[in-house]
């Protein structure tokens, strides 16, 4: 709890990425509040936000378990898992939010934010940044590549540059980006493949990327998602964890090679990296399946195209999610 009424940054969700951002911004001297559940709030109140891995520090930060009590924040960053986002944001509809963006997976996030705050206050964003929260509440910071922020209109803006520059100066790499919709969809195309193979193989990222069989399946998922993006009239880019534009334009063989090359880079630079979806599965948390793969299938249906491989993984992962929950 806090008596402070206005914050520079409010973060909805205090998992791995939310905590990494919140901790770095707080350490840099910005007023930060973490909107989180009581159990996580108790950890933060007792020990602060504790970061290890690529950075080693602990910092105190304000917490709030009832988001409806937030009065004002210059920037809202949505960092919770996608299930329940719309409901969580309704608790913030009366808060004075200057700008809002989400680092969640999938493009649905922007639509949800716009419904609550209006399109003018919403920025697009994606995070090629990774971490893992341990049971103790400590966060292992494993990957610090880039957080991209931009206007949904695709134009450059001073506010996107300012927010990205503030985050970058705090120690989490960030930059403003034009055509953020193209970049977000490009990441989503890669993420669908990565998430699907991560949950089904339950392996570290580099292992399934360098395996010829799983690399082939992942390449086919990317190329199938590329068909959807092309139909939507959105241009893909190689500015993603995988060079998805090139993978969709070239041969299947070259796409598999690109996947395996990415795997070798993960093995060299981020050997311990595991997708957040795999972390969720092993921790007993719900998987982000309906808001991501399900969202893609809804878009495909409206475009009157089929995505058979995406649909297959959607049903398989949904079954994994249901049976895991039943076992728990």
Image (tube, grey):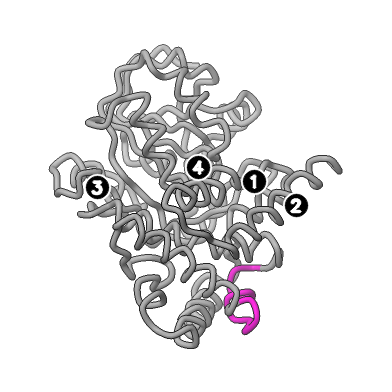
Residue 187 image-quadrant placement: bottom left
Few, some or many residues within 10 Å of mark 4 (<14, 14–19, 20+): some
Q: Is the C-beta separation of discs 4 and 1 under 8 Å? A: no
- Which label is found at residue 77? none
Q: CA distance from mark 4 to mark 2?
A: 36 Å
Q: CA distance from mark 2 to mark 1?
A: 9 Å
Element type where label 1 sits in the image:
loop
Q: Nearer the viewer, residue 36 or 244?
A: 244
Q: Residue furthest front?
A: 304
Residue where numbered disc 4 is placed: 58
Q: Name the N-terminal-most of marks 3 and 4.
A: 4
Q: Give, as a single range, the part of the protein colored magenta.
A: 204-214
Q: Name the N-terminal-most of marks 2 and 1.
A: 1
Q: Name the N-terminal-most of marks 3 and 1.
A: 3
Residue where numbered disc 3 is placed: 150
Main SS class of the magenta portion in the image: helix
Decide whether residue 312 is among the magenta residues: no
Element type where label 2 sits in the image:
helix
Few, some or many residues within 10 Å of mark 3 (<14, 14–19, 20+): many
Relative to 6, is 56 above or below? below
Relative to 320, is 101 above or below? above
The residue positioned 20% from the left and 44% from the top of the image is 153
| In front: label 3 or label 4 | 3
Few, some or many residues within 10 Å of mark 1 (<14, 14–19, 20+): many
Q: Is the C-beta separation of discs 3 and 4 under 8 Å? A: no
Q: Is residue 27 left or right of residue 224?
A: left
Q: Is residue 310 left or right of residue 79?
A: right
Q: Name the N-terminal-most of marks 4 and 2.
A: 4
Residue where numbered disc 2 is placed: 320
Residue where numbered disc 1 is placed: 287
The answer to whether one can see residue 1 in this image is: yes
Say which quadrant the C terminus sits in.
top right
């Amino acid at each position: 709890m806090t008596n402070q009424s206005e914050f520079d940054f409010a973060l909805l969700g205090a998992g791995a990425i939310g905590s990494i951002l919140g901790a770095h911004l707080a350490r840099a001297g910005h007023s930060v509040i973490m909107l989180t559940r009581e159990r996580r709030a108790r950890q933060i109140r007792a020990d602060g936000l504790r970061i290890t891995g690529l950075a080693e520090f602990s910092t105190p930060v304000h917490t709030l378990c009832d988001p409806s009590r937030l009065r004002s924040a210059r920037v809202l960053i949505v960092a919770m898992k996608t299930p329940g986002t719309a409901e969580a944001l309704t608790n913030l509809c009366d808060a004075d939010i200057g700008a809002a963006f989400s680092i969640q997976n999938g493009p649905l996030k922007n639509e949800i934010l716009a419904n609550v705050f209006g399109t003018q206050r919403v920025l697009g964003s994606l995070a090629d940044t990774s971490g893992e929260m341990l049971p103790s509440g400590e966060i292992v910071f494993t990957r610090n590549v880039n957080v991209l922020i931009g206007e949904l209109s695709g134009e450059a803006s001073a506010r996107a540059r300012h927010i990205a520059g503030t985050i970058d100066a705090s120690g989490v790499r960030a930059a403003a980006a034009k055509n953020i919709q193209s970049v977000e969809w490009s990441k989503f195309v890669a993420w669908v493949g990565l998430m699907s193979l991560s949950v089904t193989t339950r392996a570290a990222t580099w292992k399934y990327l360098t395996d010829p069989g799983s690399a082939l399946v992942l390449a086919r998922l990317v190329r199938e998602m590329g068909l959807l993006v092309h139909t939507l009239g959105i241009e893909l880019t190689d500015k993603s964890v995988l060079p998805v534009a090139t993978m969709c334009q070239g041969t299947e063989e070259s796409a598999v090679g690109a996947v395996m090359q990415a795997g070798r880079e993960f093995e060299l630079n981020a050997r311990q990296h595991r997708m957040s979806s795999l972390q969720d599965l092993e921790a007993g948390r719900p998987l982000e399946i309906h808001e991501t793969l399900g969202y893609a299938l809804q878009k495909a249906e409206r475009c009157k195209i089929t995505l058979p491989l995406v649909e297959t993984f959607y049903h398989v992962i949904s079954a994994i999610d249901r049976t895991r929950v039943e076992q728990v």
